[in-house]
């Protein structure tokens, strides 16, 4: 099937090695607009989109996240990041941080975060901007600097980290993961 949306989905991959090149403001505005177009349960829109272009702040978030990971009893996530170069955010020059409020039933807000993150990732891919949806960004907000980071990023009162998407340009081309057709079944 020849379809632009399906082609974008097929070529998107998780970039884990970025250059320092920053996406343009116009491109980031287009990505933010695509994020705002994401549907949400009961149209509650309990999220915000914060585009962070401050490399120093991203570095501080990364440092705190690695510190928190290193102190967990289960070291598997920390060791996995170390095996990939020791960078939680893979040198990304930019990140879209998505804080969220609390939904009812509790936890439903995270479905909405997943939808908005996918909109960001697909919009970025369509614009030639590499990306990775980064669930581990939550560890940067799990330590002693949580409130400081929430204030510096302008989280609304009562909001916590939902998810982030790292944005930039790959150091070397990547490829999408292999599709496992065994995971699909049709009923009826």
Image (tube, rainbow, N blue to C red):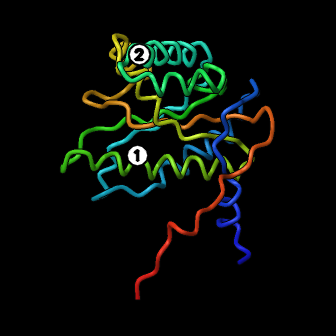
Q: Local crowd at mark 1 within 10 Å, few (<14), some, or many (≥20)? A: many
| Left or right: 94 in relation to 23 | left
Identify the residue at image location x=50%, y=66%. 183
Image position, residue 85 (x, y; %) = 66, 21
- Residue found at the very far right of the displayed protein: 172
Identify the residue at image location x=61%, y=53%. 122
Q: Nearer the viewer, residue 90 or 69?
A: 69
Figure quadrant of residue 10: bottom right
Mark 1 and mark 2: span between their CA atoms? 23 Å
Vertical placement of 133 versus 4: above or below?
above
Image position, residue 64 (x, y; %) = 46, 13
| Left or right: 174 in relation to 83 | right
- Disc ID at residue 68: 2
Image position, residue 154 (x, y; %) = 40, 23
Q: Nearer the viewer, residue 152 or 114?
A: 114
Identify the residue at image location x=57%, y=31%. 95
Identify the residue at image location x=18%, y=49%. 104
Return the residue at label 1: 113
């Amino acid at each position: 099937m020849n379809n632009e949306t399906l082609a974008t989905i097929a070529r998107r991959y998780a970039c884990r090695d970025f250059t320092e090149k920053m996406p343009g403001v116009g491109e980031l505005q287009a990505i933010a607009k695509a994020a705002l177009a994401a549907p949400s349960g009961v149209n509650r829109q309990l999220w915000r989109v914060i585009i962070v272009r401050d490399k120093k702040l991203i570095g501080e978030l990364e440092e705190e996240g690695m510190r928190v990971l290193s102190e967990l009893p289960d070291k598997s996530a920390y060791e996995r990041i170390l095996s990939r170069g020791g960078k939680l955010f893979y040198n990304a020059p930019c990140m879209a941080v998505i804080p969220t409020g609390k939904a009812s039933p509790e936890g439903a807000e995270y479905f909405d975060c997943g939808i908005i993150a996918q909109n960001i990732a697909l919009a970025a891919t369509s614009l030639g901007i590499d990306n990775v949806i980064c669930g581990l960004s939550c560890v940067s907000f799990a330590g002693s600097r949580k409130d400081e980071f929430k204030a510096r990023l302008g989280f609304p009162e009562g909001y916590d980290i939902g998810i982030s998407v790292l944005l930039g340009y790959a150091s070397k081309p990547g490829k999408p993961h292999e599709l496992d057709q065994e995971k699909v079944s049709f009923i009826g």
